[in-house]
Image (cartoon, coloured by chain):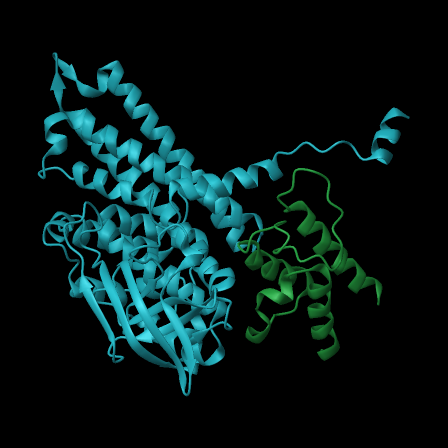
Chain colours: A green, B cyan
Amino acid sequence: MDNQFNALCQQIREFVEANMNVDDEVALKDDDNIFRLGYVSSLFAMRLLNFIESISGITVADEDIVLPNFSSIDAMSALIQKYRSAA
Amino acid sequence: MVAQAVHPMVAQARTFADEVLRPQAGRFDSEAAVPREVLAQMAELGFLGARLPPEYGGSGLDALDYGELTVAIGKGCPSTRAILTVHTSLVGETLARLGDAEQKRHYLPLLARGEKLACFALTEPEIGSDASSVRTHYQAVAGGFLLNGRKRWITYGAIADLFLVMASCDGQMSAFLVERGTPGLTTRPLHGLMASRGAHLAEIDLDQVLVPQSALVGRLGAGFSFVANTALFYGRYSIAWAGVSLAEAALEEMVGYARKREQFGKKLRQHQLVQAMLTDAVAGVQVGRALCEKVGRAIDAAADEAVNEVNVAKYVTSRLGVQITSDAVQLLGANGISEEYPVARLYREAKVLEIIEGSTQIQQMLISDYGVRRYRVLPPKREVARAARG
């Protein structure tokens, strides 16, 4: 994993953490399903898509715009990695 | 004050509104129909493709200019403005963002030219704010999908050629493009409405409607989280400016009347209680405009804050619209409730903005959640605190 990729993942993590609807401190794990755990609502999915595209410069293809690809830090990291590998 | 440059299309829209819409808006309302020839003129002038990308025949207006276009048309006739909200914003912009290459290539030029009018079919007889629970059902079958269900309160549904339909299967919502003429799709105009009388609202029945695989917008299951939410974001931006349009139109009526009408030997505008109403209206219009312009700039900068701020703008301007149009009716007194003046119609039209594209109460839920994140005071980070202590 290169530094740029790690930085992207960290930005995504901070973006998610800043938008979680939780009262107490929650330690967000990389494999936490943020929708199922109620940390964010599905309204947040579109913002995640826009955010990832804006920070990474990738354009997520139609077939990848599905909730599971945005449901955890791990899933979003894998999505970015997939596009970086294909580039 | 330095005059700001006005986009030529916005200037055209203002002229069109003054010459075509404003003189006829009352008739469109009483006859319960914006005539097709008016929509054709809008298409001819490029308004219906205002926000669509130029590569698909649109004019590619930025968000701010599109807001001004919405205000111009909305001040002329709210029912006519509604075609921009549903056709250009809810469907056109959403297809431009999430449609596949073939959907964009095929549909966007048709929408930009107004050769097909589009509408957004989400709401149902039993499903309004709880939008993720739609009962219209889809089933994957050989050759595509079978749709069954009923939609209601669909703006421009009575005359639209293309329907962006939200349907559900096993708890997963998906979005489909359905063309008028598809066997099993029927529409019935809705009448007896308080507002949006000219906007061709309809109930839509889908009875064993077979659409091809290519009708699916986005992926299966992405209908609510991506497609509907994207559409509603664009729709809310449009409605936020629509609130400004009604507030401004009402303020202009108030000013015209208060400068002319005399009571107790002096102009209405010289009475302090009238001055209070005018002050609230002026301040309200400027607050609403400022919020919408802030969102417009955020959209043009592709800034994430636009998603939350559009809710704030829509919430504020739709409520301001009701307040200022109500004050306009009050200021005009008995004339305010007469069809000889437009303010009663503006008042009726303002109320619907608090209901559509996320009701005031839905906005309160969203904005409250946003607020408890946005305005939460975090304890200082240890290293920062340590540095501050020296």
* Residue at the spot 24% in from the left edge and 79% down from the top edge: B181
Q: Quadrant of residue B156?
A: bottom left
* Residue at the spot 52% in from the left edge and 55% down from the top edge: B300
x, y percent for residue B380? 78, 32
Q: How many marks?
A: 0
Indicate whether B215 appears above or below B38.
below
Q: Nearer the viewer, residue A81 or B174?
A: B174
Most extreme residue toward the bottom, as rendered?
B142
Q: Nearer the viewer, residue B6 or B254?
A: B254
Q: Nearer the viewer, residue B104 or B176?
A: B176
User: Is A6 left or right of B352, judged from the image as shown?
Assistant: right
Indicate whether B106 appears above or below B62.
below
x, y percent for residue A70? 63, 62
Q: Nearer the viewer, residue B273 or B82?
A: B82
* Residue at the spot 47% in from the left edge and 49% down from the top edge: B296
Most extreme residue toward the right, as rendered?
B390
Most extreme residue toward the top, as rendered?
B264
User: Is B44 left or right of B362, judged from the image as shown?
Assistant: left
The quarter in which the C terminus of chain B is drawn is top right
The quarter in which the N terminus of chain B is drawn is top left
Q: Can see residue B88?
A: yes
User: Is B388 left or right of B258, judged from the image as shown?
Assistant: right
User: Is B150 left or right of B365, judged from the image as shown?
Assistant: left
Q: Can see residue B53?
A: no
Most extreme residue toward the front, as rendered?
B170
* Residue at the spot 60% in from the left edge and 50% down from the top edge: A40
x, y percent for residue B180? 26, 75
Q: Quadrant of residue B93?
A: bottom left
x, y percent for residue B163? 32, 69
